């Protein structure tokens, strides 16, 4: 079975007008996604942000649950945050995984926007169950990954589709759904 890594990137992202931006880091994304990631056997959950002050904030959030009052208040959150690693950018994430796994991961971009040629959840699940190479699932913030980031990925996962035309899940919700589809009990 393939090792699965997860990355939440904040740059380069798109804003609602299609411009490349750096998005804000949120407390809930860090601890909610780490809990989902640990539940579904993700080896490491990366949070990448180019702004040093926001990486420092992220480390303070992690430290609160690892060594601060939160560590004794909620031990299950402490455990989930043990798999979180902070990086500056996508390249830092790739380098960290290469050091950990011994090779470059197969990189899978995600987006809520429909397009052609997307890998299905069924196909990616099969690959994860039958491939020995590591895989990295890349999550974006704002209005999604910038095209130059998508171009650096090996695959592009199909979007999560609901029952209506509205399709704007939080990244925390999308991560949980994706992980359940890819690693959940069947």
Image: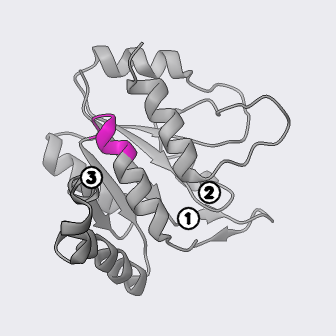
- Residue 72 at x, y = what percent? 18, 67
Residue 90: which numbered mark, if any? none
- Asked whether the residues under the numbered discs 3 and 2 touch, taking CB atoms below 8 Å apart as contact, a structural biologist would say no
- Residue 138 at x, y = what percent? 46, 47
- Asked whether the residues under the numbered discs 2 and 1 touch, taking CB atoms below 8 Å apart as contact, a structural biologist would say yes
What is the CA distance from the residue labelled 2 to the residue labelled 1? 6 Å
Q: Residue at x 45, y 70 (%)?
A: 27
Binning the other alpha carbons within 10 Å of mark 1 as few (below 14), some (14 to 19) or many (20 upward) gives: many
Residue 172 highlighted magenta (yes or no): no
Q: Residue at x 74, y 34 (%)?
A: 114
What is the CA distance from the residue labelled 3 to the residue labelled 1? 27 Å
Residue at mark 2? 146
User: Dot 3: what SS?
Assistant: helix
Residue at mark 3? 80
User: Dot 2: what SS?
Assistant: loop
| Part of the protein shown in magenta | 36-42
Q: Earlier in the sequence, mark 3 or mark 2?
A: 3
Which is more toward the observer, 170 or 124? 170
In this view, the residue farthest toward the front is 73
Give left or right: position of 147 versus 124.
right
Residue 12: which numbered mark, if any? 1
Q: Is residue 170 above or below residue 3?
A: below
Q: Which quadrant is home to the N terminus?
A: top left
Q: Which quadrant is home to the C terminus?
A: top left
């Amino acid at each position: 079975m393939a090792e699965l890594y997860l990355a939440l990137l904040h740059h380069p992202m798109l804003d609602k007008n299609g411009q490349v931006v750096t998005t804000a880091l949120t407390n809930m994304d860090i601890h909610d996604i780490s809990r989902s990631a640990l539940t579904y056997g993700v080896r490491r959950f990366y949070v990448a942000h180019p702004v040093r002050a926001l990486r420092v904030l992220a480390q303070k959030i992690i430290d609160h649950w690892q060594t601060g009052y939160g560590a004794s208040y909620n031990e299950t959150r402490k455990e989930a945050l043990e798999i979180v690693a902070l990086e500056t950018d996508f390249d830092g994430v790739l380098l960290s995984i290469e050091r950990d796994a011994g090779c470059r991961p197969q990189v899978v971009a995600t987006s809520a926007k429909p397009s052609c040629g997307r890998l299905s959840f069924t196909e990616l699940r099969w690959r994860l169950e039958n491939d020995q190479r590591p895989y990295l699932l890349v999550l974006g913030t704002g209005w999604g990954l910038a095209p130059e980031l998508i171009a650096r990925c090996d695959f592009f996962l199909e979007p999560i589709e609901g029952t209506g035309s509205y399709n704007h899940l939080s990244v925390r919700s999308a991560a949980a759904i994706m992980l359940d589809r890819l690693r959940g009990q069947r």
